[in-house]
Amino acid sequence: MTAAELSLGPVLFNWAPEVWRDFYFAIADEVAVDWVHLGEVVCSKRAPLLDKVWEPVVERLGAAGKRIVFDTPHLVVSPAERQALRALSARQDRMIEANDGGALALLGGRPHMIGPMVNCYNEGAMAWFAERGAVAICLPGELDSAAIATMAQAGRGLGVAVEVHAFGRVPLAISSRCNHARAHGLHKDGCQFVCGRDGDGLAVQTLDRQDFLAINGTQTLSHAVVCLLAELRDLVAAGVSRFRLSPQTIDMKAVVTLYRDVLDGRRDGVAARADLGRLVAGLPLANGFIHGREGLALVTA
Amino acid sequence: MGRFELICPAGTPAALRAAVDAGADSVYAGFRDDTNARNFPGLNFSRREMEQGIAYAHARHRQVFIAINTFAVAGNLAPWHRAIDDAAALGADAVIVADYAVLAYAARRYPDLRLHLSVQASASNPEAITMLREQFGIRRVVLPRVLDVSDVGRLCHEVDVETEVFVFGGMCPMAEGRCALSSYVTGHSPNRQGVCSPASHVRYETRDDGLVTRLGGFTINRFPRDEQAGYPTLCKGRFVVLEREQYLFEEPTSLNALALLPQLAEAGVTALKIEGRQRGRAYIEAVVRQHRDALDAFDRGETWSSPELDGLAEGGRETTGAYERRWR
């Protein structure tokens, strides 16, 4: 079972540059992930904030032997966003993950990855992506295990590594409207970067004060934390070769250790899930999508 | 600049005939299964009904587009392929498609079948659209509702395909085709099952403080007893953030962009689209006629208006939505 790899998804939240930098330094120095995704994928206004810490992080990760993937934004509309995408895509020396149709267009004809915000729902779409140079595809979060198994099998024939989101709040929607700014009574253009106050997203509750969703700038995520620890071994058996862990403000080193231990057969998945429940302190775990249920469900049997 | 083409929804044969009679240039409709993004009980067309609908429209020199715009299920692409086969055989004037697998199939099998890129494909920049023209020969793109009018204008000038934009009806505040909110709460999604916030998961509860609307066990909104309750579409609900009850994502409003006709004409938009395949015949008749009259007046250089649309808008309120930058 050692063939399966772990990837650390891009930090989705607006962490302060030095926090972002120190997080990746720690990943480089101490954490056993195979792939590290970098990039501000949610909001183009945030991207310049990372300018001064970007190169040191890339160097440190590279020196530690991590394979780095540069992720393109989820939504690309404005001239400035398109220009940034072209600049990122022009780097032939880098492995890039496409997160929208524009990136697909610019990366066609060279090896690249496909991110979970690009709709790959079936083997037909996968074949088209592979033909254009995709070498790995992180599937959309809402797929069930049957769809994943079908595509993992197709991926083997096409030479495409199939990856699934296995830990973290799962992205559910993206908008051109900034709901985070809106919640503070602000407009996107004058947002004061209020999203920086919420390292794991801003809590959205129902009128009954039931926990519901999380807001992260223009992105909406689940309140629950996806946990596929108990499903990992079945997914590996089905042909999934990579698992994505999405950074949150909790101890990610401990999260990675749990996933690695289960993949390597040192821990039982169900027992590890109980440990993860304690790590995420107070947040519910969920695995509903993979079981063909509503995403927030936690199927334990 | 040429006149706008008016694209109108039909969830039933009666609505299709009403739309044609009221002045639609083209009607869009779907088959009665999960190949289309308005897969609601009691809606949509059998193959025979589609054939008759196309005959009705063609006899009046109007067009019918068939929406095959969900994402095909892994391991079971046949229903989507069959929908394309049947659309071609029935003489559809275009198919509206979102899935790359379905686009590839249609382009390979039916090179003469006109392909329109669904809004569900979320192609928000010229790079994506040009790629899909080169790869699949798409002739038109329905633009995602994340663009403002200046974005629409820039895009129209950079792509070699026609553009179609929504001007009226329900409006997703999220990028379409990339939203799993409904799926997270109910297990049913627009992309896979062609439904959002499905009625099967809706409950109405009378409480001391009024009527509560719920979706999949979550309260979406609460209404005083004397107020009519809106349907609990997840993104149009009221939630608590920062201790404040608010319509976080979007108010229960309808898009109405008719005020922006000059800007849309200047941008070079080909076609204007009305949302609402789930709507009844009478609604379709009224909304289509209002739009026909407004567009005809606009073509003549006269002032146009749509005052009577007020009563038809969702929640009685209207917005120009993402077309104006202030919406963001």
Image (cartoon, rainbow, N blue to C red):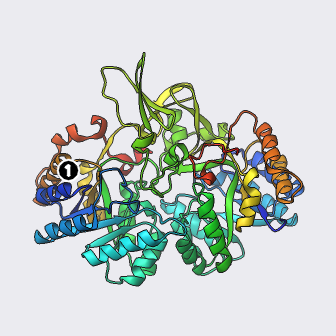
Residue A126, located in which quarter of the rendered image?
Answer: bottom right
Residue A72 in view in this figure: no
Q: Chain of mark 1?
A: B
Q: Which residue is under mark 1?
A: B284
Q: Residue B21, position in %: x, y?
A: 11, 58
Residue B232, located in which quarter of the rendered image?
Answer: top left
B311 on left or right of B109? left
Q: Residue B208, position in %: x, y?
A: 42, 15
Residue A284 in view in this figure: yes
Q: Residue furthest front?
A: A301
Q: Which residue is more in the foreground, B185 or A34?
A: B185
Looking at the rendered structure, the kind of residue marked 1 is: Ile
Q: Residue at x 73, y 45 (%)?
A: A248
Q: Residue A239, position in %: x, y?
A: 71, 68
B107 on left or right of A21? left
Q: Residue at x 74, y 65 (%)?
A: A237
Q: Residue A148, position in %: x, y?
A: 62, 63
